[in-house]
Image (tube, rainbow, N blue to C red):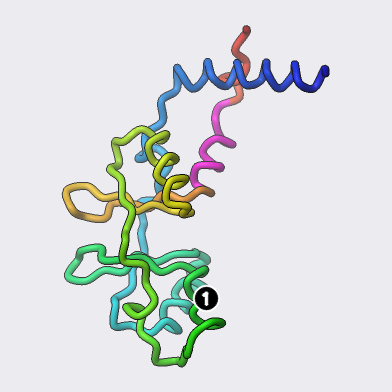
Amino acid sequence: MRKTKYLLNKLKRIQKVRERWQLRVRDLMTSEVLSVGPEETVVAAAEKMLENRIHALVVTENNKAIGIITTYDLVLVMSLSDFNKLTKVKEVMVTDLVTIGPDEPLKNALRRIIEYNIRRIVVEEDGEVVGILSLIDIILGFAMVPEEMFSVNI
């Protein structure tokens, strides 16, 4: 019973913080987005992800985002298909790209992430990729909220 009261009080404090501290996508996104071309091989994409310690690459053609390829996609294609070292990114990339603007409230990004059951969302402004927002970016963003934001008296 005591734990329930503690959690309810914590939720109330967080709600008050959220009302005062309105995060935008721009505040937490990663602006250095790595990309890959649709004609590159999935092996080249995997190597690029490994070298940069990332889990997704935006697929671009003529400087426009046309898809995304993730480590999850690579695992699926390598285990469930007729994969070979010449398989092209365009054959396995996700083309239904979910995007959001950098000035959108963070809650809108979270809604889309939940709605589409994805782990990252591409941030576009005027048709150009300006960032990528992942669940880990959001978690780290909230982990780094100044402690005084959570010391709100109820």
Find residue 116 and report its horizontal and vertical position in percent. Answer: 42, 51
Quadrant showing the C terminus: top right
Q: Is residue 140 rendered magenta in the image? A: yes
Of all residues shown, which one is farthest toward the right? Answer: 1
**Which residues, given as a range, are shown in magenta?**
137-146
Say whether residue 150 is left or right of residue 109: right
In this picture, is 20 found above or below 95?
above
Q: Is residue 109 rendered magenta in the image? A: no
Say whether residue 18 is left or right of residue 126: right
Find residue 147 and report its horizontal and vertical position in percent. Answer: 61, 24
Residue that appears at 31% across and 61% down = 96
- Badge 1 is on which residue? 76
In this picture, is 112 found above or below 42?
above
In this picture, is 142 found above or below 115?
above
Count of numbered labels shown in the rendering: 1
Residue that appears at 28% across and 43% down = 101
In this picture, is 32 found above or below 9?
below
Find residue 130 and report its horizontal and vertical position in percent. Answer: 28, 51
Q: Nearer the viewer, residue 64 or 74?
A: 74
Quadrant showing the N terminus: top right
Q: Nearer the viewer, residue 14 or 147?
A: 14
Say whether residue 122 is left or right of residue 20: left
Q: Amino acid at mark 1?
A: Leu
Say whether residue 30 is left or right of residue 80: left
Residue that appears at 26% across and 50% down = 124
- The chief SS type of the magenta part is helix
Of all residues shown, which one is farthest toward the top? Answer: 154
Find residue 134 and report its horizontal and vertical position in percent. Answer: 46, 51
Tell me the SS state at disc 1: helix
Residue that appears at 56% across and 82% down = 79
Mark 1 nearby-residue class (10 Å; few <14, some 14–19, many ≥20)? few
